[in-house]
Image: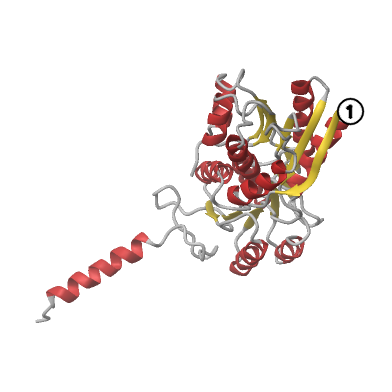
Amino acid sequence: MMRFNGAALAAGLAMLMVVGCNSGGDTNTTTDNKPAVGGTDKKPDFTIAVIPKGSTHDYWKALHAGANAAEKEFNVHIIFKGPLKEDDKEDQIKTVEDFTTQKVDGIVLAPLDNVALAKPVDAAVAAKIPVVVIDSSLESKTYSATAMTNNYKGGQMAGDAMAKLLGGKGSVIMLRYEAGSASTMDREKGFLDAIAKSTGIKVLSSNQEGGATVDSAQQKAEGLLGGFKNPDGSSQAQGIYCPNESTTAGMLLVLDELHWAGKVKFVGFDSSPKLLDGMTAGKIDALVVQDPFKMGHDSVATMVKILKKQPFDKDEDTGATLVTKANMNQPEIAKLISPPQD
């Protein structure tokens, strides 16, 4: 008769439980070992890697939620993995290379740099892994499709809003995001082109970069605005524009510090609870808001069509909306500015 040691048996059972709990959603999952979808025994049709620019901004959390909704809808397995901060190009390059080695079925990528990410994308496509580019354009001809905001048009929207707020007269400051980010570069150009139509508006500064985090944007904004302070402590600029969530949030902190919030017209980009609070308080006049949930969902839907060799939209504009205190509580706008997050 076999005798069992009680402690050994308990330890073995505990180990089995741990292995079972960790079997799904691993970034090392390959197409030969796909986890079940939605808590069922049904295996997914495809494994798709979704690689954002970063992991901390509310924007990417909403995009993740959209990708997860598509995962359930189309019976695919989503692996969502990106850099912690939006300035780690090397980490994102390595992530694309790792997923190429793992032979996932498809890659959805928001490139941190429109040039640096071209080579790893070309390598993935050469390995017969299709790529859908989201959020920001890429200097490559090998990817299959895009799903993103028309960022130049979004920047124009912000510039037109600023010109209207100023009545076509005054001085403005633009705090850029970071060189290499095609999406924000397009928003910056769109803004400046729109402002240039108002000959009564002067651009005081448009060459400073806030960087990838709220902290770096706050530090840069402190130095930038300090250089345009009148002797009585007031601002020489009547309007300020920022092209993404982190620069807008960092600038808002500095406007509060200087007691300029609500006195200077302020137009930003993207939404978050803090930015919406700023709008409610009258500190932000307008936000150009994207639809990251739709972007996450539709990019996965497009990838599924590509993998199934079905017709697909090669270039989808996922839209942008100008949000103000006057319209932020409208049902469609409220849903857009507070999307689900994962």
- Circle 1 sits in a helix, a strand or a loop, which is it? loop
Q: Which is nearer the eye, 249 or 58?
A: 249
Q: Is residue 206 above or below residue 268?
A: below
Lateral position of residue 56 relative to residue 132, left or right: left
Residue 69, horizontal then vertical, whole percent: 52, 41
Quadrant, the N terminus: bottom left
Residue 165, horizontal then vertical, whole percent: 74, 22
Disc 1: CA contacts within 10 A as few (<14), some (14-19) or many (>=20): few
Q: Residue at x 53, y 46 (%)?
A: 71
Residue 278, horizontal then vertical, whole percent: 56, 30
Looking at the image, the residue that sits furthest to the left is: 1
Q: Which is nearer the eye, 66 or 13?
A: 66
Q: Residue at x 12, y 81 (%)?
A: 2
Q: Which residue is mark 1?
A: 197
Q: Can you see residue 309?
A: no
Q: Residue at x 76, y 37 (%)?
A: 173
Q: Is residue 194 above or below residue 165?
A: below
Q: Can you see residue 92?
A: yes
Q: Which is nearer the eye, 251 or 292?
A: 251
Please state which amino acid type lies under the numbered disc 1: Lys
